[in-house]
Every structure is written in structure tokens, then in C-alpha cells.
Image (tube, helix red, strand yellow):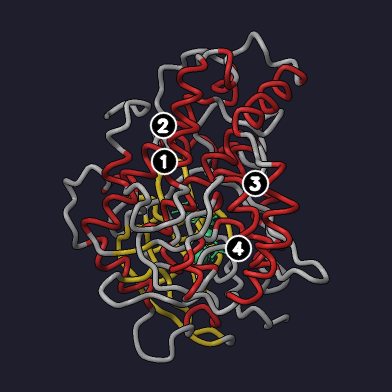
């Protein structure tokens, strides 16, 4: 048995906590965990079990995992806040031992697709604008709750950590469990969670994306508090997946909640354009961080001020490179946002999607301009001037503003 990842080789039908939880299917997996649907026989409900790998379970040397503390704080914060429904509902936690070591297991509400899985169903991988606006609005509410109510920075807002809440969980699960071929219930042969196919709880009929006004508003939830941090002490450690990393994180400066807003801006662009906003590369003479900062300057049209660069360890390098690369090479080709949106539009029509409700044909150019302005306000270089989740929610592009 391969023990490298320390993943627990969960079996379908397996029971935890003296028979209270019965595993019914696999929902997903990540770097430190596999996630399973289970029946909670004590409370007669479906739950999700996030079983951390032995490695993930002992990431902090001292006592309780940060993820446990974060989830506990979420569960004890104000449930009537408008963002509460948009952050993963944590129910409880338990631990158990295996040959690999100790495993922490979080019991949470079962959710449906994550964004990449949902997007993989779309012909051109691009969501309709209305859906993106609803999604971003839900994320902003969730972030407002995390930042203002709970004192938490998520630090890993990414597509695979954004999940859809199913419309009618019990009915869907009953239906799906009845329909699924028994072959997917095979036991995994190794401890790698990749070996067993996973089956998200599907909740949307796919024609949803081809209807003009489906009438049903999707509800999105921020999950995976595995990298989250409390804002009561200064934060400096490297955080966030690299392409979504805020400039203050790249530079190793002190940071806080605004880093989540930066990631959100990058994601909104990605959802609209169907490609990453920043794709930093390392080359012979340019470190990846510098290329990233150059791309940021290029795409936002903003320059880092000297006071900020003063604090940056790679300052000398950046000075040389701003002189040579940013100014001479990139700036003359300043990225044009309108052009980006035009390209996305052209790609959609190329895919034969004009005439359906995809992306811009329903959005007037005024709305597109407002969306670009909004993305830019999330990508303000100075974190103190970057828009907050609360402020952003007042923007009329969002339903509940
Ligand atoms: P990462 O590699 O992103 O750090 P992780 O090990 O911290 O991952 P999660 O992101 O929490 O784990 O979960 C892994 C995957 O499992 C998610 O991308 C999602 O598809 C699925 N998943 C997690 N929680 C749930 C849930 N409550 N309901 C349904 N699916 C879930
Ligand atoms: Mg994750
Ligand atoms: Mg994680």
C-alpha cells in the first residue's frame, strides 16, 4: 500500500463513530484530504466528511489545527448575517487512527459541483454573465462575513474551493444513489484518493445553461478553510495559489482581508474571459515574482509606488527590471480590457453561441463597462485603497445592492 500521501483509504459502506456515519460515495479530493458523502444515522441526514490525510492532520505542531479553529469560529458567529449562507456550514469534527497515523475529519453540509467541474460541462468553458454576477455577489457576501464578522482571511479563494449549493439535496441524492451503477462502489486499491472516481452531487439539469431565464438563481458557497488565517495578528507567510496571489503577498509584505478581494478580481476576469488574468512565468533572467509584478503593472495600468518598493526584498532587481522590462517591453503594449472582452465575445460567436444567451449579447456595453470597472477596483495595487467586500456589495451590477 502506498502511504506517501497519508490519505485514508476510505471504503464505500465504511462506518465511522461507532456506526453513526455510513459512507455512501466519494465527493472529491484535494491536496490534504478526500471528501465523502455519508449518512448521519443519528440525525437522519446526509453529511460530507472531509477526511484529512495523516500529513494534513498534523500540519501544525502545536495542538488544534488552524482549520478546526477557523471552522469553530464560523459556527459560533452570527448566523443571521447575509454572508452566513455563503460559507461552508461546519457541523462537527472527530478524529480516528489508521496505519497512516491520526486523521482529523470535518463533518459539513454536503454541497454540489465546484466551479471547474461545472465549467467542464460548458462547450466553451465560459459562464453566462448573469451567472457570473450572481456568483461574485455570493462570494462577496461570504467574504464580508469572513472578514468583518469572523476576523478571518480565507487565503485560498480559487475555483475548486467555490461550490454550488444543491436545490433539493435529499431528493437528488436518493435519485442518484438509485441510478448509479454499483461498479463505482469498488474499493480503492491504494491510499491515493485519485484512484476512485468521484461523483459530485449533481443538482442542475445541464439545459440550465441553454435557457434564457431559467428562473432559478444558483447559490454559491465558499469552502476549504484549510489555509484560512485569523486577522488578529500580522500576516506575512506566503499564501494563495500563485496566479491569484495579491501583490502584497508576492512582495512578502504584511497583509490582511484585501488579499481575498484581489483573488476575487482575478477570478471574475477568468470566469468572463475563459483564461487566467495573470500567468506568471520564470525565465532565465527574470524570477517568476518579477514577471508577475510586471504583468500586474501591465494589466492594471498602475505602477507600484516607491514607498512600497522600498520594503520589497527584491527591490534592486525590480528596479533594474522595471527600468528595462516593464517600461520598455510591456508598457507600450498596455493590456486593453475592452479588447479582452471583445475577444471573449468573438470566441463565443465562433462557438456558434450567438443567439443563445451566452455572455454579451444580453449585456449592453454600459454593463460590460461597469463590470470592467468593478474588476479593476478589486485589483487596486494598494490594499488600503482596494475595495472591501462590504463596499463592493453596493455596486448596482449586483442584484441585492
Ligand atoms: P486543496 O487541495 O484545495 O487544499 P483540500 O484537501 O483542502 O483541497 P477541499 O478543497 O476542502 O480539500 O475539498 C476537496 C474537494 O472536495 C473540493 O474541491 C470539492 O470538489 C469537494 N468537496 C469539499 N467539500 C465538499 C462538500 N461539503 N460537499 C461536496 N463536495 C465537497
Ligand atoms: Mg480545496
Ligand atoms: Mg485546502
Residue for badge 4? 242
What kind of element bears circle 3? loop
Residue 3: quadrant of the picture: bottom right
Q: Is residue 174 above or below residue 310?
A: above
User: Do labels 3 and 2 touch, CB within 8 Å?
Assistant: no
Disc 3/disc 2 C-alpha distance (Å): 20 Å
User: Do labels 4 and 3 touch, CB within 8 Å?
Assistant: no
Using the image, tell me which numbered label, if any, was put on residue 220. 1
Front of the two marks 3 and 2: 3
What kind of element bears circle 2? helix
User: Do labels 3 and 1 touch, CB within 8 Å?
Assistant: no
User: Do labels 1 and 2 touch, CB within 8 Å?
Assistant: yes
Report the front residue among 60 and 295.
Answer: 295
Disc 4/disc 3 C-alpha distance (Å): 11 Å
Residue 356: quadrant of the picture: top right
- Quarter of the image that includes the N terminus: bottom right
Residue for badge 2? 134
Amino acid at each position: 500500500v502506498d502511504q506517501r500521501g497519508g490519505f485514508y483509504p476510505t471504503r464505500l459502506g465504511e462506518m465511522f463513530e461507532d456506526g453513526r456515519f455510513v459512507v455512501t460515495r466519494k465527493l472529491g479530493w484535494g491536496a490534504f484530504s478526500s471528501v465523502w458523502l455519508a449518512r448521519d444515522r443519528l440525525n437522519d441526514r446526509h453529511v460530507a466528511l472531509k477526511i484529512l490525510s495523516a500529513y494534513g492532520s498534523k500540519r501544525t505542531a502545536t495542538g488544534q489545527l488552524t482549520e478546526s479553529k477557523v471552522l469553530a469560529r464560523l459556527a459560533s458567529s452570527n448566523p443571521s448575517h447575509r454572508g452566513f449562507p455563503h460559507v461552508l456550514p461546519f457541523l462537527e469534527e472527530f478524529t480516528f487512527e489508521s496505519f497512516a497515523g491520526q486523521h482529523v475529519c470535518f463533518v459539513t453540509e454536503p454541497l454540489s459541483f465546484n466551479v471547474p467541474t461545472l465549467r467542464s460541462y460548458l462547450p466553451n468553458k465560459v459562464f453566462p454573465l448573469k451567472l457570473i454576477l450572481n456568483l461574485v455577489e455570493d462570494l462577496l457576501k461570504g467574504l464580508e462575513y469572513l472578514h468583518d464578522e469572523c476576523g478571518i482571511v480565507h487565503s485560498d479563494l480559487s475555483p475548486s474551493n467555490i461550490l454550488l449549493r444543491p436545490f433539493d439535496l435529499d431528493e437528488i441524492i436518493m435519485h442518484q444513489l438509485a441510478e448509479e451503477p454499483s461498479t463505482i462502489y469498488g474499493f480503492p486499491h491504494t491510499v491515493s484518493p485519485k484512484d476512485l472516481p468521484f461523483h459530485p452531487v449533481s443538482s442542475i439539469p445541464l439545459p440550465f445553461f441553454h435557457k434564457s431565464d431559467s428562473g432559478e438563481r444558483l447559490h454559491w458557497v465558499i469552502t476549504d478553510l484549510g489555509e484560512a488565517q485569523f486577522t488578529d495578528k500580522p500576516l506575512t507567510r506566503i499564501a494563495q495559489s500563485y496566479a491569484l496571489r495579491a501583490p502584497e503577498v508576492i512582495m512578502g509584505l504584511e497583509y490582511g482581508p484585501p488579499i481575498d478581494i484581489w483573488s476575487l478580481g482575478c477570478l471574475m476576469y477568468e470566469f468572463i474571459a475563459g483564461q487566467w488574468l495573470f500567468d506568471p512565468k520564470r525565465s532565465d533572467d527574470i524570477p517568476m515574482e518579477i514577471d508577475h509584478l510586471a504583468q500586474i503593472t501591465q494589466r492594471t495600468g498602475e505602477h507600484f509606488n516607491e514607498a512600497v518598493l522600498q520594503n520589497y526584498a527584491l527591490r534592486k532587481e525590480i528596479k533594474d527590471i522595471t527600468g528595462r522590462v516593464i517600461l520598455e517591453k510591456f508598457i507600450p503594449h498596455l493590456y486593453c480590457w475592452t479588447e479582452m472582452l471583445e475577444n471573449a465575445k468573438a470566441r463565443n460567436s465562433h462557438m456558434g453561441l450567438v443567439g443563445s444567451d451566452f455572455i454579451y449579447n444580453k449585456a449592453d456595453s454600459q454593463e460590460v463597462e461597469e463590470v470592467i470597472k468593478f474588476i479593476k477596483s478589486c485589483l487596486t495595487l494598494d490594499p488600503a485603497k482596494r475595495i472591501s467586500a462590504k463596499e463592493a456589495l453596493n455596486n448596482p451590477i449586483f442584484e441585492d445592492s
